[in-house]
Amino acid sequence: MGKIIAIANQKGGVGKTTTSINLSACLAAKGKKVLVIDTDPQGNTTSGFGIDKNFIQNTLFEMFRDECSIQSCIISEAIKNVSVIPSNVNLAAAEIALIGDDKREFKLKNEVDWIRDSYDYIIIDCPPSLNLLTINAMTTADSVLVPIQCEYYALEGLSQLIYTVNLIKEKLNPALEMEGVVFTMYDSRTNLSAQVVDNVRNNLQSRICKTIIPRNIRLAEAPSHGMPITMYDPRSAGAESYMKLADEIIG
């Protein structure tokens, strides 16, 4: 049975999509069969794998509306060992589409249950908000991985996210656990990044990943080429860091 990890943080710009794309690609490079589910209406994870999100017939939104099965909206082998359930701006209407559905918090889970045995890992990229899409991701997931940017406001909102995770664990998904917190955009040239890491470690009871993702220009460039870092620049510091994170997740 595949392990399902939701990558979540209601703050934007902390590296959720970068982590979803590159962790998936690194798990695949280590021989794991991976499915990525893009639950963000911006569809950046979809385009990060070189998929044109504007010209797809079946996306997560159509699946939510029961217009297609989960199998028919999977784009197989977007890269080797990685398949993608895509999204685009239509997904912004998902909450409206699910009004009146008494199982709306479990819509994604009930579909994913059909196919989870076909994959070693299922990675869910969440939108930057604690909405119904994020709740669907967390009711589906086994664990939540939280990227935190190494900046002054890193802890802001984290307590709210952890409260939400605990609430969903209590009310909707008793099996949900914290996979951990991963630091992103670490700049070794500044004292601030080191101070943020120390501050979070001293104030957070959750597991913190040993791997720290550096601020890396190659990581920032890769999405504009529709490639994960493993294809765009496999020897970069960003690629090496996500490979280590993949080892940590597997371990």
Image (tube, helix red, strand yellow):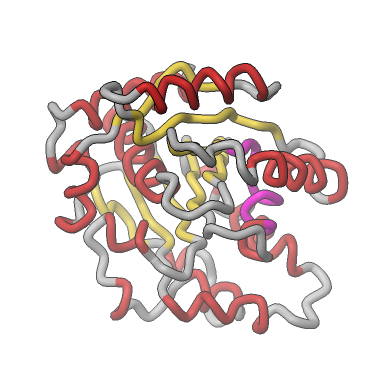
Check the image and report above or below for 169 versus 57.
above
Check the image and report above or below for 91 versus 207.
below
The residue closer to the viewer here, 247 or 162, is: 162
Residue 198 within the magenta-colored segment of the rendering: no
Q: Going 27% across and 55% down the picture, which residue do you hit?
A: 49
**Position of 47 compared to 3: left or right?**
left
The residue closer to the viewer here, 161 or 133, is: 161
Q: Going 68% across and 65% down the picture, which residue do you hit?
A: 132
Q: Going 42% across and 20% down the picture, which residue do you hit?
A: 194
Q: Quadrant of residue 211?
A: top left
Point out residue 24 in the picture as x, y percentages from the top left corner: 37, 40
Residue 138 within the magenta-colored segment of the rendering: yes
Point out residue 216 in the picture as x, y percentages from the top left corner: 22, 35
* Region in magenta: 135-144
The residue closer to the viewer here, 1 or 57, is: 57
**Position of 27 compared to 6: left or right?**
left
